[in-house]
Amino acid sequence: MTTLAPTGRLRGRTTPRRADVVFRSGTRVFGGAVIATLGVVAAVLVVSSVPAWTRFGVDLITQTTWDPVRDVYGALPFIVGTLYASAIALLLATPIGILTAIFLSEFAPRRVAIPLSFTIELLAAIPSVVIGLWGVFVLSPFLRDTVDAWLVATLGWLPFFRGPSYGVGLGAAGVILAIMILPTIVSISREVLSSVPNSQREAMFGLGATRWEVAIKAVLPYARSGVIGAVILGLGRALGETMAVTMVIGNGQDIPVSVFDQAQTIASKIAVTFNEASGGLQTQSLVAIGLILLVMTLLLNVAARLLVSRVQQGPAQ
Amino acid sequence: MAIEIRPREDQPVVTTRPTTEPASARVPTRAPEQAAAARTTKIEARDLNLYYGSFRAVRDVTMDIPANEITAIIGPSGCGKSTFLRSLNRLHELAHGARMEGRLLIDGVDIYERSVDAVDLRRLVGMVFQRPNPFPTMSIYGNVASGLRLGGGPKPADLDEIVERCLTRAALWDEVKDHLGAPGTSLSGGQQQRLCIARALAVDPEVILMDEPASSLDPIATLRIEELMLELRGSYTIVIVTHNMQQASRVSDQTAFFSMGEDRAGYLVEMGQTTTIFTNPREQLTEDYISGRFG
Amino acid sequence: MSATPGTLAGSRAPFAERLAAVRGSRRRTMDRVMRTVALAAAVVCVIPLAAILLFVVIKGAAALNLDLLTKPPKALGTGGGALNAILGSLQMVALAALVAVPVGVLGGIYVSEFASRRSARAVRFGADVLAGVPSILIGIVAYTLLVLPFKQFNAAAGSVALALIMVPVIVRTTEEMLRLVPRELREAGYALGVPTWRVVLSVVLPAGRTGVLTGVMLAVARAAGETAPLLFTALGSRLVNVGEFGQPMDALPLFIYNGARQPITALNEQAWGAALLLLLFVLGVNVAVRARSWGRRAG
């Protein structure tokens, strides 16, 4: 490798060099372990669910009966429940989150923006089970008696708002998820918006734009793929969120239609059923829907990270 | 306050302009009566002080900027010339802790008066920035139309016409007319800057501020921008900040020289006809700067 | 209308008149309204946090007593405390940290000090993706590998599951913090002929110590609040389990979950009390750690 003849002095350093090699490859093992772990997670879920896939195939996704007595498993209601609850969460959290990010990055003075961002990020640190506890005993009864009652009274003729509401159900799960993904959407959107070069703002201000117009016509379009990334990351979190949802979604086995229906998401179904299923086809089927969840969240995470890094590297096209 | 139009008496009258100087090439294009009689002051700064927090960036600037001419502001970096420029469309005040004292009038209107909204002002005082900053998510057409669309925008047919006119005026039309839908950022640096000029023209400003508009461009693109400025002169009051003294001497009618005081605040050393400033300045400081002496 | 846009300086009305003509009162109203709406959105974001804190503090404080901290639940019926859960959380999180900290820190060192650009990106990406894996799936994996073969729910499996959740957090913060260590510091070490491993361990790592510690503490706080990975591993237990990692063990999150699911007021109240304890720890760590880095960013 080296063309220079090693001098005595350099040769004397072989010992530390060997230590270097050991140290370097040691750390590489641990770096690699992170990626290997991902592989292990995927492998375990694939291998453990093979019997369910061979037995049911696509029926696992398309069938609506989950019946341990007949040992037949179709997870469509839970897949729908997952998507439904996440959709409600996104519907609520996206506009609020993006507006908040705009407020923090464009309008608020620093002495307001900094503590406020801090507070919102703190929300992300609250354990899921604590939010669930609050959801069961505070939020669900509150929703049932106020928002839900009003929705049933005014929009109850629509199948999506057919009552009655028991408090716990898809709607409550959606609201809880919205609360839980807000910090993700806000903090990443805020970062992305803040990384928009000032020259873009000045260009719009220079044309006689108001602050709102600058935010909405110059800053947001420039950062749009990153903001979309933030929302997708939020969606990824919503899909996989388990405890809080399990606690407020009730326990419905049918495909939900109304937001007041009780339901299950993939994650909550696994949480509630896994231990009592111990072994056999039901466990394998639960792992199989876990694999579906893994694929969904991985795809969303990868897509979101690509979008976010794209904005931070340069302008969106 | 009445609109104030007064002849410029306070400027030294220059009688000789060397014919070899490139700028003289444009003299014949001016109507003779315009050159002498219609010389009005567009912008008046009176004891203008600009601050960032407690730091004074510009100190006690009093100057008159003539209408429909090109006024260049030169000076060492950090002398507050950009800050001064940004106070003319009240962009300065968007910076954290920014503040101004004194008076700034455009056609006699005090632009810092409470009844004047900075947002409205900026529609009449356009700006072109140091680096071309077209909106990357908008097409070429959309970039030019962006200012007009803020107010809801005119009818599509009218908009088409205005966009064409502004791009023509910015000497860009022939190059882009076949791909108006392409993103603004697909153009070369020089073209992008001309697009930004077209964008500024579209809202029909009276004053155009240029903050080192060619500093990021190659010599050929720079030349085109300079030609364009001379083209626009007569219809617009142009104020350009430049670190390039040759550029100032090439394009401007008036030159203001800023320097930095001991307190790091920029101030106006002197202002006059460009030829005077570059050949026969009153102040030693100016003389030193243009001949490259410092310290 | 005197100011037709785009007249390109034909004949213009006086400046003052044009200034009045371009005045967009509708746009100005829109600006004011939408900025208020944005402010309102920010307030809406804070309301859930405030509401959760408020109820946990009020209801939790009511349930907080010496029994909760010092006694396990009664074997039958209700009563007793959460000692089993408190001790369980402490042990499982400690064991998880014991596994995750070396792995995470060394992995972070690899990314920041040794990895090529490509492998650095790969590990970083892997860590981000791993952090995005739903924690319930981590629970399934730990169950499959560490519970099923022994046919015994056990606390060690719970610790491993928690460690898997901690590792990506530690890797990312370690890497970010070490990259902040100035290059000159490393070069000073190399210039003295110090081998790389010693430069990293005795110069770089100590210089980035507080940052790395920050990451570790955040990871610990995160793990302490996790429920889903423990459901199929540590399972939970009404007994105080000290040191027997081959047996089921309780944890505060499990205690809260189980208490909240029962239609028995006394258990619900205990869940609130446990939630207050958990929240005090998790938010305490987060506030302490984040306030420092936020303060630095702000200053």
Image (cartoon, grey):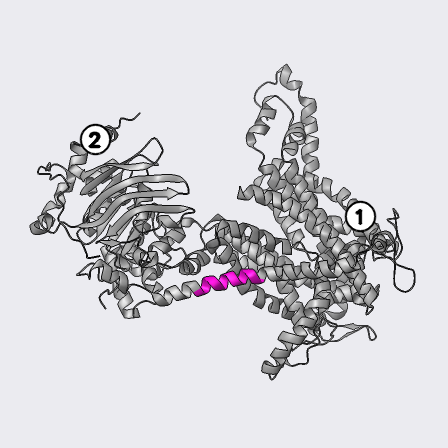
Magenta stretch contains residue C41: yes
**Residue C177 occupies quadrant:** top right
Q: What residue appears at the point 77 percent right and 48 percent down from the top-left corner?
A: C93
Q: Residue furthest front?
A: B1
Q: Is residue C116 left or right of residue A45?
A: left
Indicate whether A47 appears above or below C171: below
Q: What residue appears at the point 21 percent right and 29 percent down from the top-left corner?
A: B287
Judging from the image, mark 2 belongs to the subunit labelled B
Residue B39 seen in this snapshot = yes
Residue B165 seen in this snapshot = no
Q: Nearer the viewer, residue C226 or B79?
A: B79
Disc 1 is placed on an element classified as helix
Indicate whether C98 appears above or below A43: above
Residue A139 coordinates in the image, percent (x, y): 68, 68
Label 2: how many Cα within 10 Å (few below 14, some 14–19, many 20+): few
The residue that mark 1 highlights is C90
Residue B5 coordinates in the image, percent (x, y): 16, 53
The label nearer to you, 1 versus 2, is 2
Q: Residue furthest right?
A: C76
Magenta stretch contains residue C202: no
Q: Is residue C232 left or right of residue B7?
A: right
**Residue A281 badge:** none
The residue that mark 2 highlights is B283
Residue B68 coordinates in the image, percent (x, y): 18, 51
- Chief secondary structure of the magenta portion: helix
**Residue C291 occupies quadrant:** top right
Judging from the image, mark 1 belongs to the subunit labelled C
Label 1: how many Cα within 10 Å (few below 14, some 14–19, many 20+): some
Disc 2 is placed on an element classified as loop
Q: Is residue A50 left or right of residue B77?
A: right
